[in-house]
């Protein structure tokens, strides 16, 4: 009986100490099982928009709170690869990559919504020339997801006079490029009027369930530390390992992140950055450069851009392309889990 009373008293004192520690802003860690004593029901007590905690580095109080997350997804199921005839990894029709991209984004948004209930999520589709049956499928999938979304059918005639592409003596490729560039212009026009974060996505990027949650956590943490807006890409591109460039490593919620100076056209940033570089970004859709992302890379020379290690998304291009398959990820597993 004495032992029972002693244990009970010890339990009461422990609860009191836990509550006091939390009131003072501390998190206690049980070294026996590495759990947070003050938050036994969760693996990590980081709170979106308030604090980021990483063992053993401690806490970063978030000052840059994310309010909304808008995804602008550019789709075109009628064209395999804009400027080449090579087959993509897994050798499926283009519509299959588009739908698995959408499925993966839906899963990732729902995961992020559970972790970050204070943030609103919206998907906007900018479609260029996909068959009606594909548009109907996209519409049905998004309706069933119960997420906020809208679908815009691009009118190429609105932009054709503004667009200058590299002459290739191949009308089909040149027309494909014009369509892509018109979609890019439209995406930046929309982003200019949004509220906060904007994620520009191509329709051949299949995302991990954790990708959006991790990107938001990284954005809040890194922009708080750097006291500035940033750029984030979801892919650990293999071609960036072929360049002799120095890099900085930061720690996100679950991934390491490294600073990079290049990316393709799938990236995350804020409305503030879009407005700051609006005239430059619009030029990406008006004049084709070589390499195409030259203007974006020029922006990265002035601003911070970060890439995850390992990758949070699979870029489904040709298997031999240095712009595609990221190292140290299970591409097949990611592909299979996002089938229709």
Image (spheres, rainbow, N blue to C red):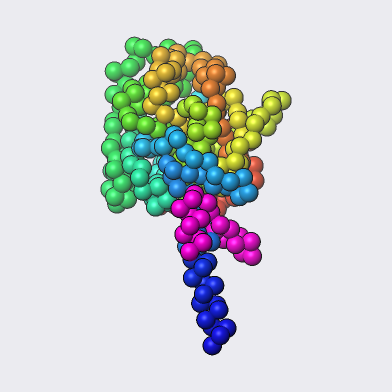
**226 up-or-down from 26: above or below:** above
List the single residue furthest toward the right. 244
**Res 250 quadrant in image:** top right
Magenta-drawn stretch contains 23: yes
Viewer-nearest residue: 227 or 186: 227
Asked if one can make out residue 224 in the rendered structure from this viewpoint, the answer is yes
Q: Position of residue 297 (x, y in %)?
A: 55, 20
Where, quadrant-wise, is the N terminus in this rendering?
bottom right
At 50% from the left and 61% from the top, the residue drawn is 18
Answer with left or right where residue 276 lies relative to residue 9.
Answer: left
Left or right? Give the position of 249 relative to 73.
right
* Residue at the image point whose x is 46% and y is 32% from the top: 268
Can residue 78 be seen here?
A: no
| Residue 313: x %, y % from top left | 52, 42
Residue appearing at x 34%, y 11% in the figure = 161
- Is residue 9 in the magenta section? no
Residue lying at 63% horizontally and 49% vertically, measured from the top left: 56
Q: Which residues are magenta?
A: 16-36
**Residue closer to the observer: 255 or 311:** 255
105 or 212: nearer the viewer? 212
Task: Give the x, y percent position of residue 97.
Answer: 45, 42
Q: Nearer the viewer, residue 274 or 93?
A: 274
């Amino acid at each position: 009986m004495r032992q029972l009373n002693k244990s009970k008293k010890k339990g009461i004192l422990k609860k009191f100490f836990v509550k006091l520690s939390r009131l003072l802003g501390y998190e206690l860690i049980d070294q026996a099982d590495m759990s947070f004593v003050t938050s036994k029901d969760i693996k990590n007590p980081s709170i979106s928009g308030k604090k980021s905690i990483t063992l053993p580095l401690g806490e970063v109080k978030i000052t840059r709170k994310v309010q909304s997350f808008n995804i602008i997804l550019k789709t075109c199921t009628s064209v395999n690869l804009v400027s080449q005839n090579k087959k993509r990894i897994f050798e499926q029709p283009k519509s299959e990559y588009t739908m698995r991209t959408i499925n993966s984004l839906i899963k990732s948004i729902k995961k992020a919504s559970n972790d970050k209930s204070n943030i609103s999520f919206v998907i906007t589709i900018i479609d260029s020339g996909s068959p009606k049956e594909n548009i109907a499928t996209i519409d049905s999938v998004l309706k069933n997801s119960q997420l906020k979304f809208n679908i815009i059918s691009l009118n190429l005639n609105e932009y054709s006079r503004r667009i200058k592409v590299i002459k290739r003596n191949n009308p089909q490729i040149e027309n494909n490029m014009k369509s892509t560039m018109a979609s890019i212009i439209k995406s930046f026009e929309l982003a200019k009027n949004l509220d906060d974060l904007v994620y520009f996505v191509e329709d051949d990027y299949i995302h991990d369930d954790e990708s959006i949650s991790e990107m938001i956590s990284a954005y809040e943490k890194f922009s708080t530390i750097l006291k500035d807006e940033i750029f984030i890409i979801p892919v650990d591109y293999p071609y960036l390992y072929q360049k002799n460039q120095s890099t900085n490593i930061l720690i996100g919620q679950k991934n390491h992140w490294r600073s990079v100076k290049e990316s393709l056209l799938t990236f995350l940033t804020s409305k503030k950055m879009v407005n700051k570089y609006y005239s430059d970004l619009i030029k990406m859709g008006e004049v084709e450069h070589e390499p195409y992302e030259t203007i974006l890379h020029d922006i990265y020379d002035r601003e911070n851009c970060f890439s995850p290690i390992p990758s949070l998304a699979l870029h489904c291009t040709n298997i031999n392309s240095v712009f595609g398959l990221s190292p140290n990820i299970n591409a097949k597993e990611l592909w299979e889990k996002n089938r229709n």
